[in-house]
Image: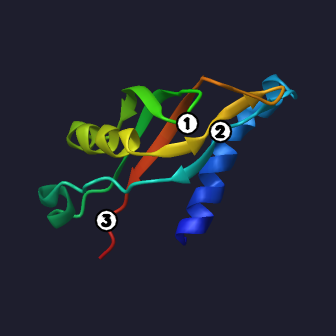
Amino acid sequence: MNSLSKLALLSLLLAAPLLAADAGREPPVPVRTVAPEYPSDLRRDGVSGMVMVKCTIDEQGNVTEPEVLKSSNAAFDKPAVDAVKKWRFKPAKQDGTPVAIKVTIPVKFVCET
């Protein structure tokens, strides 16, 4: 899956609960994503995983208050949170006005051999 496809999938994951909850709200849209640093020992051992990072996207599109909701391996937690902190978004809007919103971002670690 190329970067654009991943970005489109992420946009859909972020938008789905918002669209169902409130038709007047526009979901946040990622404009810059940063891949997490893959722990070298886990890459070497062929370990893949997933971290669900809950955070707030503020009115300027910055990620704030990131925290791990669920993780397949604790060694992936810090790299996932560090990466998500660097992401930037076009902020969510309510009736055309930027608003802060809580989202959960899945961060995948896939060891490709």
Look at the numbered disc 2 and give the secondary structure of its residue. loop
Q: Are marks 1 and 3 in contact (CB under 8 Å)?
A: no
Badge 2 crowding class, 10 Å Cα cut-off, few under 14, some 14 to 19, many 20 or more, is many
Q: Are marks 3 and 2 in contact (CB under 8 Å)?
A: no
Look at the numbered disc 3 and give the secondary structure of its residue. loop
Which of the numbered marks, if any, corresponds to residue 111?
A: 3
Q: CA distance from mark 3 to mark 2?
A: 29 Å
58 shown above or below 45: above
Amino acid tagged 3:
Cys
For residue 84, what is the image quadrant? top left
Badge 3 crowding class, 10 Å Cα cut-off, few under 14, some 14 to 19, many 20 or more, is some
Q: Are marks 2 and 1 in contact (CB under 8 Å)?
A: yes
21 or 75, which is in the foreground?
21
Point 39% across, 54% down: residue: 34
Tell me, what colour scheme is on the image?
Answer: rainbow
* Mark found first going from the N terminus, 1 or 3: 1
The residue wearing badge 2 is 28
Q: Quadrant of the C terminus?
A: bottom left
